[in-house]
Image (cartoon, helix red, strand yellow):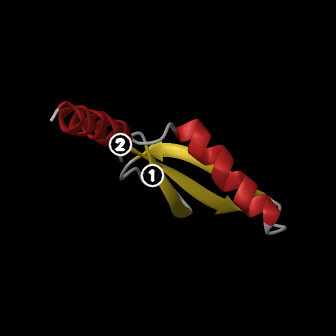
């Protein structure tokens, strides 16, 4: 029974950590690494508030969905 309670407690902590979302700078660098690995150049990634009017394509969300990462070419 103690193991079950401990497991439930650990899972609830893990769930809240995942719900918090990834920090934007960390996600931005991961996305940039993937884009660079595909050989792309001449682009920029910008962190903006969710729903902000930004020219470009949203390629990720971070900080519990409150911000977006926007890809711009050129």
Q: Residue at x 34, y 38 (%)?
A: 14
Q: Find residue 29 and report its horizontal and vertical position in percent.
A: 67, 45
Mark 2 Cα shell of 10 Å, populated few (<14), some (14-19), many (≥20): some
Task: Locate residue 4 relative to residue 22 in the image: left or right.
Answer: left
Q: Which residue is drawn at 30% across and 42% down?
A: 15
- Secondary structure at badge 2 equals loop
Locate the N terminus and report the quarter of the image it occupies. Answer: top left
Q: Residue at x 61, y 46 (%)?
A: 28
Task: Locate residue 70 relative to residue 51 in the image: left or right.
Answer: right
Query: In the rendered view, would you say 54 is above or below 29?
Result: below
Residue pushed farthest front? Answer: 1
Residue pushed farthest bottom? Answer: 38
Q: Find residue 71 and report its horizontal and vertical position in percent.
A: 61, 59
Report the Cα–Cα distance between label 1 and label 2: 8 Å
Work out whether residue 74 can be spotted. Answer: no
- Secondary structure at badge 1 equals strand
The quarter holding residue 4 reads top left
Mark 1 Cα shell of 10 Å, populated few (<14), some (14-19), many (≥20): many
Query: In the rendered view, would you say 33 is above or below 19?
Result: below
Task: Locate residue 29 relative to residue 58 in the image: left or right.
Answer: right
Q: Find residue 69 and report its horizontal and vertical position in percent.
A: 53, 51
Locate the C terminus and report the quarter of the image it occupies. Answer: bottom right
The quarter holding residue 16 reads top left
Q: Which residue is drawn at 36% across and 53% down?
A: 51
Residue to which mark 2 is pinned: 64
Q: Find residue 61 and report its horizontal and vertical position in percent.
A: 45, 52
In the depicted view, which residue is nearer to us: 16 or 59? Answer: 16
Residue to which mark 1 is pinned: 61
In the depicted view, which residue is nearer to us: 10 or 47? Answer: 10
């Amino acid at each position: 029974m103690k193991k079950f309670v401990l497991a439930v407690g650990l899972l609830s902590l893990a769930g809240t950590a995942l719900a918090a979302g990834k920090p934007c700078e960390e996600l931005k660098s991961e996305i940039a690494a993937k884009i660079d690995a595909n050989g792309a150049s001449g682009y920029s990634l910008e962190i903006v508030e969710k729903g902000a009017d930004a020219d470009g394509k949203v390629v990720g969300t971070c900080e519990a969905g409150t911000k977006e990462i926007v890809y711009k070419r050129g």
